[in-house]
């Protein structure tokens, strides 16, 4: 019988194998935008999406877009300092509407209704197959499926 592994190491290994650690960490930028760039810049810009380590930002006016283009190296440094590592490699700006009050989707919208593709389910099961403890495997399966559904829900919301 194998020696039991700490749940933390199992979760870290699972998150890394599913490649969701970087997106989860980088999306913390969205909630902390005011803190990262300051209120004056945040009033005229808003992060919209992160794809392939590129942060896409909506900007209120062409003048602000030009100013932020000049500030791009500083913004990248501030963002990556906030993240604790260099996860964002570039920033792209686009004219767009800025929501003054970003609201969190209501919990009445169920993420349980989200459907996962077979590839995601197979990756989860592949990671779980290495575990001997059935109770732990079932609990971790539930957590990973909910996490994948949440990520799927967030992608659809954008």
Image (spheres, grey):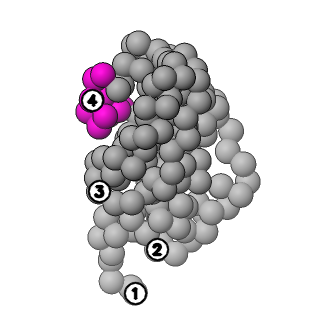
Secondary structure at badge 3 equals loop
Q: Earlier in the sequence, mark 1 or mark 4?
A: 1
Instruction: Identify the residue position indicated by label 2 in the image.
Output: 132
Q: Residue 154, image x and y in percent?
A: 55, 34
Residue annotated with mark 4: 38
Residue 103 seen from this side: no
5 above or below 88? below
Which mark is first along the chain, 3 or 4?
Answer: 4
Please tell me whether the stretch drawn in magenta is mainly helix, strand or loop.
helix
For marks 1 and 2 on the same chain, the one whose residue lies earlier in the sequence: 1
Q: Secondary structure at mark 2?
A: loop
User: Looking at the picture, does residue 47 appear above or below residue 72?
Assistant: above
Per the image, the residue denoted by label 1 is: 1
**CA distance for labels 1 and 2:** 9 Å
Q: Comparing marks 1 and 4, which lies closer to the viewer?
A: 4
> Which quarter of the image is occupied by the N terminus?
bottom left
Please tell me whether mark 3 or mark 1 is closer to you in this view: 3
Measure how far apart labels 3 and 2 are at the Cα level: 35 Å
Badge number at residue 84: 3
Q: Is residue 36 magenta?
A: yes
- Nearer to us: label 4 or label 3: 4
Magenta span of residues: 31-40
Residue at figure coordinates x 34%, y 46% from the top left? 74
Q: Nearer the viewer, residue 38 or 29?
A: 38
């Amino acid at each position: 019988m194998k020696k039991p592994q700490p749940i933390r190491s199992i979760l870290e290994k699972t998150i890394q194998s599913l490649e969701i650690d970087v997106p989860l960490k980088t999306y913390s930028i969205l909630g902390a935008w005011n803190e990262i760039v300051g209120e004056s810049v945040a009033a005229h810009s808003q992060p919209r999406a992160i794809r392939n380590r590129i942060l896409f930002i909506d900007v209120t006016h062409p003048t602000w877009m030009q100013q932020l283009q000049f500030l791009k190296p500083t913004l990248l440094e501030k963002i990556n300092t906030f993240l604790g590592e260099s996860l964002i490699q570039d920033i792209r700006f686009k004219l767009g509407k800025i929501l003054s009050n970003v609201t969190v989707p209501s919990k009445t919208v169920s993420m349980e209704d989200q459907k996962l593709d077979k590839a995601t389910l197979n990756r989860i099961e592949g990671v779980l197959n290495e575990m001997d403890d059935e109770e732990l495997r079932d609990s971790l399966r539930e957590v990973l499926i909910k996490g994948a559904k949440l990520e799927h829900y967030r992608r659809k919301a954008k």
